Amino acid sequence: MSLFHDLLQEQINLLKEKGYEEKVLNSPYKDGLLFTQLRQEFSNALHESLREDEPATFQIATVGFFNNDKDIVQISFSYEFAPANNNLSLKEIEFIHNDNQRKLNINSPHDIPHYSQALLIFTKEVRILQNRSNKIR
């Protein structure tokens, strides 16, 4: 297999393992769209990095529903491809719900929370902020 395919498949498997695919997210998007975005954006980044001989970054995004499909969250994944060591890595995940956002820096695959856990953390933080805001008023 090619290096491109191996690196791509590694990231797809990681996202699936952590619950980041349209079916699990209850996303209105077509199943597999996130991985299609990943393939296209990684291809572009690979060509750019080889042409410029420096790391290239890109983002992919999707949406998911939680709280019995009452709430929608936007999820963005920021990646970097480093041609010096042929490494594709997820650098950050951003969650946005209403006016609240949370960015998680990713240093290793172990830092990637399962989607369900990430939402629990995120919604708990949102409730804390809302409670603080209500107490100030």
Image (cartoon, rainbow, N blue to C red):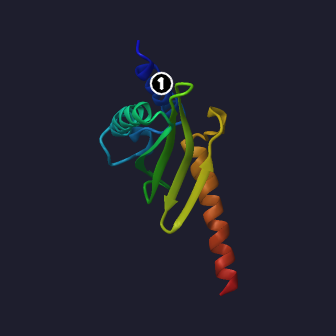
Residue 136: % across, % down: 69, 84
Q: Quadrant of the C terminus?
A: bottom right
Judge left or right: residue 81 versus residue 36: right
**Residue found at x 55% / y 34%:** 89
Q: Nearer the viewer, residue 135 or 80?
A: 80
Horizontal and vertical percent position of residue 124: 64, 59
The x, y position of residue 122, in whole percent, is 60, 56
Tell me the residue that label 1 is attached to. 7
Residue projecting furthest to the left: 30
**Secondary structure at numbered mark 1:** helix
Image point (55%, 27%), residue name: 84
Residue, x 64% and y 81% (percent of image)? 134
Horizontal side of residue 31 vs 99, given as left or right: left
Residue sitting farthest toward the top: 1
| Residue 23, position as x, y percentages in the image | 39, 39
The kind of residue on which mark 1 rests is: Leu
Task: Residue at 61%, 65% (x, y): give it.
Answer: 126
Q: Residue furthest front?
A: 52
Dot 1 crowding, Cα within 10 Å, few <14, some 14–19, many 20+ = some
Residue placed most toward the observer, 126 or 58: 58
Q: Is residue 2 above or below residue 134?
A: above
